[in-house]
Each structure stands twice: as structure tokens, then as C-alpha cells.
Image (cartoon, coloured by chain):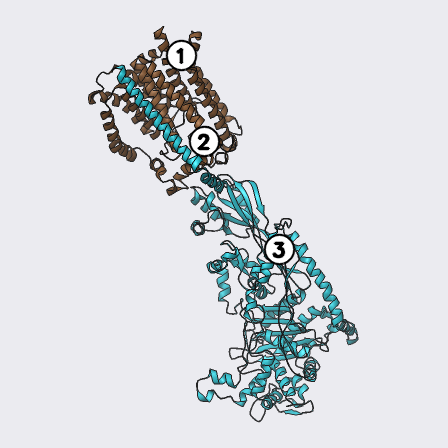
Chain colours: A cyan, B brown
Amino acid sequence: MTSKELESRLKKLAYVLVGIFFILCARLWYMQIMNGDHYATLAEGNRIRRIPVTAPRGIFYDRNGKPLVSSRLSFTVSILPTSLTTNRDQVFRDLGAIIGMKQEEIAREVEKSADRPFEPVRLLRDASAEVITQIEERRLDLVGVIVEEMPVRSYKYGEFASHLFGYLGKISERELKEWKNEGYRMTDVVGKTGLERVYEKYLKGQDGGEQVEVDAAGRPIRLLGFADPIPGNDLVLTIDQKTQQAAEKALDDQLSAMAKSKYPNAKAGAVVVLSVKTGQVLAMASKPGYDPNSFVGGISSEELEAMLQNPYHPFTSRALQVAEPPGSIFKLVTATAALELGKVTLHDKFYCTGKDRYGKKCWKVGGHGEENLVEGIKNSCNIVFYELGRRVGIDELARYAKMYGLGKPTGFELPGEKAGLVPDREWKRENFKRADNKVWYEAETMDVAIGQGALQTTPLQMATVVSAVGNGGTVYRPYVVQKVVSPEGKELKSFEPVVNNQLQASTDTFAVLRQGMGAVTGIGGTAHSAFANFPIEVGGKTGTAQNSQGDDHAWFAGLAPLNDPEVAIIVFLEQGGAGGGFAAPVARKVLAAYFGVEQETKETKKEEAKPSKSNAEAQTPAAASVAAEEKKKIVSSQPKQEPKQQPKQQQAVVPPSSGQTAETKQGKEVPAEDQN
Amino acid sequence: MERRLAKYIDWGMLIAILALIAIGLVAIFSATHTNKGLNYGDPFYFMKRQLVSAVIGLGIGFFMLNFDHRSLGKLAWPIYYVSLALLAVVLVVGREVNGAKSWLYIGPFGMQVSELAKVGVIISLAQYLSQKEDLDTWRGLFGALLLVGAPMFLILLQPDFGTAMVFVGITFGMLFMAGAKPAHLWTLAGIGILLVLPLGYFFLLKPYQRMRLLIFLNPYQDARGFGYNIIQSMIAVGSGRLFGEGILRGRQGQLNFLPEHHTDFIFPVIAEETGFIGCMVVLGLFFYILWRILHVISESKELYSNLLCTGIFSMFLFHILINIGMTIGIMPITGIPLPFLSYGGSSLITNLISIALVLNVYVSRQKILF
């Protein structure tokens, strides 16, 4: 080979060298100079992780500022999909063994959020300390598994107003679609029923986030920035914790006691206590119920199935989602109509032999003998009210029932309220096919007059009726939320009493009704034994509604104190037999709790009972308003203090936008509001 | 002698080598000082070990300058057979690292025999080719191919595809320089691509190696698995932009998103921390060294010396192309180190010996003249 040839080959090698270096430089120029920003963004995405920090939901306070529902700190076991490595199956298996899930189940959950790999996939909410310890011990093996601290709902009193409060659950696909623009994410937990649902948008708050730098294994290296979560707004309810507690307990006790009585089918019931002068709900209990806490960690499908299969429907609120014949407590309505229309006076005498000339019977075999209207109420005599019904006629009777608000929902905040039914001629015409069934018969009028037949009311409706009797004819719309208060204590929304209807009836009429109700708890009355020696004078009316499906329903309606009623109560026991026997004692316990009088006073003499009665009487409007003023102070100061007890909340560093948020929220209508 | 050495040695090349080693030491420190799982709690662990290898390599290199490189040529056949023997032994008693049986341990000292074998084969092939007159025929080429084929085959059995490919690069460079017909070389390349590559691919490579080899065409096809390395590497290189994130401040490397970032993926660490400018410095140094080797070849009058330097030139060029190319997504991942920069004693010492040979050729040229 000549040296010239060598020279030429050497040159070619040099070309190759230059060529290769040119390619490398060009590629580096392309990547670093032309696309550097793109790669830098990718690098940021790599190392910076946004960890959402769930905002604590708003707190529910009772009317005295006692927290009923709040949030506590819990641990959630999650997987960060971006941090998973090739041994993910092993991790899933090991983690599954700790948290009690199958490997495939975990894989499926992770797959579901494949399009959001930077968001943690939450597997086990409210994990026990034991589980967390086990996970921490195996930290190095469980790559991609993280434990998040987050606030969860805490229902302080367990099964307590649970139908009112509702429960929480994972956001559904439909909800997510609908609420996406409002900042909801797939991992959110939202109110499913009750107030949790109706006030969802107020209660949720605004999630914060932490910007954390992580290494390749997903371990946080340092905090880069964070946005504090803004806690949800609080609800100040009209509920009185003590009264509610008493209602829950009295109902539970009575229903379990009845299992051994003549009425073993009594498994369900409701108590509603209203403030007579405002329509505020002081207590609302329904049985069977559930403990909303059991939904917090995610309820097991077996548990849920068992609840859904329960023939007594624990999710149904008996206070407003069930309408049944009210029985004799409807006689108050019949009496109102008769008195107002002048069809009866206190001087009118009735004679009950146990049955009337139409063959209709009184509940008392042998009859009540001679009675006037007050005595008729006291005895709950059917013969008297058959006669009154006949005199008034169905048209007027139905008109008065509707004036009391029956036959349509009261407009209470919670969804699913039943309208009930006030039957009349028109109803028969429209709902029956055969010509002879389309006709209204007088016997039907008489049935309605004693609260039977096709008549249907909810306990809540009857509570508004009794309230109206107590306050002289004002039918209030019952409500349970007084105020929505922002975490800073700003009142976002407040609710005043709403009058559904004002009955045009004389005060005398209501005085007579109350006189009758007083007689019911007096000597010889149908609820006398239940209220014997009760320190406060209670007016009552018992009801025993025939039930074609089983045993009679027991009802009791009460007003207390009778001379200037403050509260109205309805006790309803499905298949509970006679109202006087089983429903009235429940009412006594609840009223005792409300007025703060002890049951032990049973044995004390009337003289000794008097002071406590006059105490109760001292709750005159003036005194009451002073007390209310004080309560208000407690309530308004409470929300400010409470969040500090929330462990996960940072020192209320509120971004300037929060004011706007509050305003926009104020402008928004809560779904339930739209229903009227 | 020392004086003459000082006078005739290629100081520019030596300084370039030392500069690369220094850059490598900093990059290795940057890549490993926070990784406590790897460095046994000593941030300087890898840096120190690399420094020791550099000192050993430089020592051997300077020692070799005392002898005429042509004396090694006379030992070509013993060197060749020792290389083969080592490659055979490692298959039996070698330790498996990253799926390839490539490490031979003698007591606590381990080495990657294929690294040393590269130099051995270059020496033997240079000697062999310098004696051949009929390289412009197929017959003449056949012997050379056989000579390279044997060690290559043993290396493929480990299996270490990357190093085997380096042999191909070396052989082509040397054959070309030795006077083989370009048409023959093209034909060989064609046969290699159409026949040998598919065979080796299917019969010698483990499935993961096959996957690794082709994933660079579309790394996002398996972004969490085999594509991960490429994606992370490219992110590191690209995010360096013009000036880099600063030394010790490259996020991809420091947070361990980059795998193997003190060995095969050292270049992205440098690229991320020093940016395009740093990359140009490194490539400039490499280019300068390779350019100087070509200069040495042009100055040298002996065919053996020419071929020896051509082999070393080809080896470096191939390593640089494959390694940097892999980190910027234009070459398959084959796991061969970047000369003077990647952590690894066997590689560094072998490279320093190679440079010593080149310098030796340069120095002996002067000898002849005087």
C-alpha cells in the first residue's frame, strides 16, 4: 500500500470522525437548545408531585353550639401510580395481605385512574394504627405505597339524627361529571344523603395541596410549596343535642321493650320535636337507623347489602319519608273545622253507646256515655267525631286539613319528603275507575274524621299541625339549619321562620283544642298514666291508626307547656298498637330531656313539682330571647375556635380569594332550596 | 530518557486525557455522593476508587512508555491466546453482573476481561494484518475475521452484545486501514446486518437484552420498563439546556431518576449539570484526542503502528458514538462505558494502556528519526 493510499484512507477515517461528532453535536443542540424547555418541563413533572390535602368538612353544631359532626384525622393507605416499579405485582400482593384486599382488586383500582398517574389511588380509608405500623415496617418493600393523613368525618354521637345528617361516600361517576367544574375529583368523598348531601357545596371546603419534591422511588425529599386547605362552612342547626339524644334513646328503648309486648312487630318509629313558634326542628329521630361513622372507612358490601335488605329500611326517615293514617290525632283537625264552622259548641252534648246508628263503632266497647267536645277529645271518642265529620262534610274537612298543610310536603330541607294524602271527592273521581267507586260516601267522611281511611300524613306534617294548634294557627315550614357560617365566622346564610299558611281561626277554637289536649293527659285521659306527675303541664292527643298491613300504628301528639306552648312533639311507632300505651311514654322522656326535668320527680308531690314548672314557665318570650341571645354568642364564637382543634388545618392563612369564594357560594342555591 | 520522553510526548493529548478523567471524577461524585444505598455511606467512595484506577492506569501507561511498543507486537500471539483463555475462563468461573458473565475475580480484585481483551485483540490483529499481503482478496480477509471472530464469539456467550459490537467497529477500522477493499467491507457489513445480527439476536441474546436493544426506536412503548432509561436519560440531557443546572444540582441524577448514572449513563449527568456548553467541552476533548491519534497515524511510518493506532482510534470512536448516542436516543442501549468518564477500573485502565500505546508510537516515531 502506498503512502498516498494510506493518506487517502486516513482522510476517510477523519471524515467518519467529523461526521459522527457532527451528528452528536447536532442532536445535543436539538435536545438542549431547541427543546431544552420541553425536557425541563418533563424533569419538573418527574420530581414535583402535588399531594392534595383534603379540606376538613364543615362542622354541624346544635342550637347551643355543641359540635355534633366534625372531622378527625385519619390515615389513608394509597398508591402513587407514578412511583410503582416493575415489581408492582409483588407490592400489590404484599400490601393486599396487610389491608385485606386481593392483588387483582388493587390492580383494578390502580388501572381505573391510569389517566391520572400523579394522583394517589386511595385503597383503605381510616386505616387502623396496626395497619399503618405494618406498612411502615415494610416501607422499603412497598415501593409506591403511601400513607396519607387526612381528615375524615366524625359523627360524635354515632347513631344520632342519622337520617337528618345523612352519610358520605365516594363520589360516583355521575356526580363527578356533574360537579367537575366545581373542583371535585375522582378521589373525593361527598355527601350522599341528608344534610351532608343538601349542603354538600357548603360543607366541602376547598382542598389544598402540597408541592413536594420526590426522588425516583416517590419518597418526598422536601416541601416546595403548599396551599392550605380551606375548611368547609359550618352548619348551625336547630337541633337540641339533649332532646335529640333523649329521642334516640327513648325510641330505641321502647322498641326493644316492645319486642316482648303484645306488639312484637313494632320495629320502627319516629320522633319529631318542633319549636312551636318558629317551626325549628329540635329533634328528629327515626328508627331503625344507622351509624354514619360506619361509612367513613368505606362500608363493606356485605354490611351495605344487609342494610339494604333490612325489611324495615334503615335508610328511610320515618319522620318524613313515610306517610300513614294519623289516627285519632287527626281529630284535632276535625274539631277545628267543626268549631270554626259553628257545627259544634262546648254546650253540645253527645252520647256514646259504643256504636252509632250507622253501625260505626267506638273503640270503647260499651261506650263513653254523655260527653261534650272536650271530653270527646279526652276520651278520643270515635262516636263524637263521626258525628262531627258528618256535620262538617268532606269538602270542609279536606279544606281544613289542607289549611293545616296536610296533603303536600311541608317544604322541609331534606329531599324525599312524602306529601301524604287528604282524600276528598275530587281525589275519588280521579283515582278510581268504576263509576260507583268514584262517588264519595259519607262513611268515608266519617273515617277521615277520625284519621282513618285513605288519609295519610307524615309525622313531620302532624308535628306542624300540632304546632299550629299550639301557636294559634300558624303553620310553619319546619327547618333544621339556622345558619351557614364560614370558618372565619362570617354568616353566609341564615334562615328565618317561614310561614306556610296562617289558619284563619279564632283563638277560642285553639283554646278549646288545647283544653281537650290537656284533658288527654289529665285524670281519665288516654295519656294520663304516661304523664302522671310530670312537672310540666303537657297537652296530648293519642292516636291508634288501623293498619291493613299489620298491627295498629301508635301515635302521640303533644304540646308543652300547655298554657303557652313552646314545643310540639310527635311520636310515631309503626305497628306499635295504642298511642297512649307506647307512644306517649316516649314523648314524656323526650320532653323531660328538653325541659331538663328529671324522671325521678314522679314520686314528688305536686307542690314540689310546681317550682320546676314555674321555672319552665319563666321561659317567657323575653327570657327566652335573652337565652337565645346568649346561645347565639356561643354559636358564633364556636366555629372560630373549633377549626384550631382540627389537627390538619394550618393556621388559617387564608388566600385573598376566599372572600370571593364565600360570596359566590352565598349566591348559589342549595339544591334543596329549589324544591319549593 | 526521561528528558527525551518529556520532549517528544504528545502533551496536548495527555492533558486532554487528564481533563476528561477529572471531569469524570466530578461527575461520578455528583452522581453517587447522595446515594447512600450504593456508596456505603461514603460520599467519595466511587470517586476515590476511580481515582485509584486512574493512578494505576497512568502508572502502567508511563511504565509502558519505557519500552518500544513494537516489542509487544512480537508478543502478539501469546497475548492473543491469553486473551482467548481469559475470555473462556470467565465464562466458567466469572461473576455475573447485569446478566452477563463478564467479571473475573482474583481474590478481592475483579476485572472485566473483555475490556483488556479488546487491547489484546487490537495488538494481535495489528501484528497479523501488518504481515498480510493479500487483504484485497476474500481469502486474505478470512483469516483476519477468524482471528477476531473467536474472542467475539466468547464475548457474545457472556452475553455482552455491546462489547462484541465494539470488536466489529475495531475490525472494520483496522481492515480498512490495512488495505481491504471497500467493496469487500461493505459486503461484510451487509452480511453482518442481514445474517449474523438476526442470528445473534435470536439465539444468543436474552429476551431482556433484545428488548433493550430495540426500545430506543420508541421508548414510550414501555415507559416504565425498558424505555424508562432512555426517557429519563433524554430528559436529563435536554433539561440541561445551554448552561446546565449547575454541578451537583442536576435533578435527574441527584434524585436517582437516571439509572446507572455513574457508569453507562454518566454523560446525561454531565449534560444535565453543565448543559450544552459542558457537552461541547467533553465532545471537544474527545474530538481532540481522536484527531491527535489520526495525527499520530499520519506521522508514523510503520504499518503495525498505524494499525495499532487505528484499532485504538476505532475503539474509542465506537465507544463514544454508542454510549453518547444511547443517552440521547439515537443508539440502542448496549451498556458500554464512555471512555475516561464512566466509573469502572477495568475500562479506565484499559483506555489508559491504549493511550499509552498511542503515545508510545508517537514517541518511537521520534526515535527513528534520530
Q: Badge 3, how many Cα within 10 Å: few under 14, some, many 20+?
A: few
Give the structural element (helix, strand or loop) at label 2: helix
Q: For residue A583, say whether it is visible.
A: yes
Cα distance in 3D space between marks 1 and 3: 80 Å
Question: How many numbered circles does the render carry?
Answer: 3
Q: Badge 1, how many Cα within 10 Å: few under 14, some, many 20+?
A: many
Cα distance in 3D space between marks 2 and 3: 48 Å
Where in the figure is residue A252, as x and y percent of width and height?
A: 61, 68
Quadrant assignment, res B82: top left
Q: Which residue is mark 1?
A: B65
Left or right position of A119 against A386: left
- Residues at circles 2 and 3 in contact by the CB criterion of under 8 Å: no
Going by the numbered disc 3, the residue's amino acid type is Gly
Q: Earlier in the sequence, mark 1 or mark 2?
A: 1
Where in the figure is residue A102, as x and y percent of width and height?
A: 45, 51
Asked if A281 appears above or below A447 in the picture, the reply is above
Going by the numbered disc 2, the residue's amino acid type is Phe
Asked if A626 appears above or below B130 in the picture, the reply is below
- Mark closer to the observer (1, 3): 3
Q: Which residue is mark 2?
A: B276
Q: Nearer the viewer, residue A7 or B138?
A: A7
Residue reaching furthest bottom?
A: A357
Q: Badge 2, how many Cα within 10 Å: few under 14, some, many 20+?
A: many
Query: Do tags 1 and 3 sit on the same chain?
Result: no
| Chain of the residue on which disc 1 is drawn | B
Where in the figure is residue A13, as x and y percent of width and height?
A: 32, 23
Q: Which residue is mark 3?
A: A659
Where in the figure is residue B330, as x and y percent of width and height?
A: 36, 34
- Mark closer to the observer (1, 2): 2
